[in-house]
Image (cartoon, grey):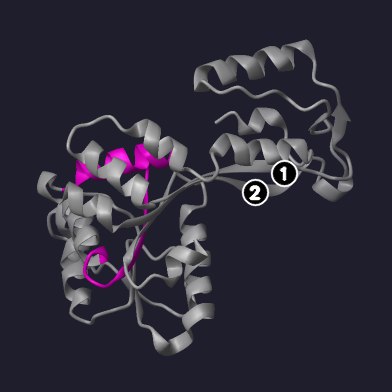
């Protein structure tokens, strides 16, 4: 993420279901950008609504006048206007329609760093959804403009004071291996796993959990990934190449927390 934020242009996309912390990750990325470049660069956001106030960026809520237009034009009206201000970084709250997607791709290809979110299950699905959202003639431009896609989920963290640790039961192994079969992966549970205490303790409010942590899948768009994406935009099936380009998967990220006994393995079966 830090590398992608240092580029002068390109598109960084955070994908995942609703309420998985996508906007929080974007807000954190903007904070990193501010730390790197300070006030030397201009940052603008287009949101509907503004979910939180972020330092270092001028945030624009889509006005009632813009909202009164056709639903598909809500963000695009404002996006066209802010491009005239020549910002270095543009945060688009969500890619929700064809016009917004086309404008994001155009901005990311013309000297702007674009950050946005999208509803998709993983990084490769995120590219698929976005490629089908933009105009067909812009899919090659999209593949070249993308810098990074990050998929995200949130998992509950076990209370370190009352969590229970032990060896996996046979039912646990069967559940996990069935999940691996669905994913087409080859992975085993560690010898020791942890789960929440049924009654919890005073420190966790008797819930057994103390908060949430993200698990992430990261797909940097290297030259090989861009070539595969361009081929996919033309109708070829190169998902295997994109899959190999991922530096970490949701499973890898989740299992690292399982091995650290910070989460219940059942919570990472996403």
- Residue 17 seen from this side: no
Q: Is residue 263 above or below residue 5?
A: above
Q: Give the residue drawn at x 46%, y 61%.
A: 26
Q: Give the residue drawn at x 73%, y 17%.
A: 172
Q: Nearer the viewer, residue 22 or 147?
A: 147
Q: Give the residue drawn at x 70%, y 49%.
A: 211
Circles 1 and 2: CB atoms closer than 8 Å:
yes
User: Is 137 on the left or on the right of 157, as rendered?
Assistant: left
Q: Which residue is tagged 1?
A: 157
The CA span between labels 1 and 2 is 7 Å
Pointer 1 or 2: first along the chain: 1
The image's mark for residue 193 is none
User: Is 34 on the left or on the right of 223, as rendered?
Assistant: right
Q: Secondary structure at mark 2?
A: strand
Quadrant assignment for the C terminus: top right
Residue numbers of the magenta segment: 108-134
């Amino acid at each position: 993420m830090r590398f992608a934020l240092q580029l002068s242009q390109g598109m960084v996309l955070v994908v995942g279901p609703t309420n998985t912390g996508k906007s929080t990750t974007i807000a954190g990325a903007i904070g990193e950008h501010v730390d790197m470049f300070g006030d030397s660069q201009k940052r603008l956001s287009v949101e509907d609504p503004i979910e939180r106030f972020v330092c270092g960026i001028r945030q624009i809520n889509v006005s009632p006048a813009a909202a009164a237009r056709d639903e598909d034009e809500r963000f695009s009206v404002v996006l066209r206007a802010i491009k005239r201000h020549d910002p270095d970084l543009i945060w688009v709250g969500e890619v929700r329609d064809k016009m917004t997607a086309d404008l994001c791709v155009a901005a990311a290809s013309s000297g702007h760093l674009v950050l946005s979110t999208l509803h998709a299950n993983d990084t490769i699905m995120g590219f698929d959804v976005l490629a089908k959202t933009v105009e067909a003639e812009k899919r090659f431009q999209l593949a070249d403009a993308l810098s990074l896609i990050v998929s995200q989920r949130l998992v509950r963290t076990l209370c370190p004071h009352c969590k229970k640790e032990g060896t996996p039961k046979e039912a646990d192994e069967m559940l996990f291996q069935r999940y691996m079969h669905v994913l087409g992966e080859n992975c085993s549970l560690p010898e020791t796993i942890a789960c929440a205490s049924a009654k919890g303790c005073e420190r966790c409010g008797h819930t057994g959990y103390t908060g949430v942590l993200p698990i992430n899948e990261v797909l940097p768009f290297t030259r090989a990934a861009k070539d595969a994406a361009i081929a996919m935009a033309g109708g070829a099936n190169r998902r295997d190449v994109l899959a190999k380009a991922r530096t970490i998967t949701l499973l890898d990220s989740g299992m690292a927390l399982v091995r650290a006994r910070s989460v219940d393995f059942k919570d990472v079966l996403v």
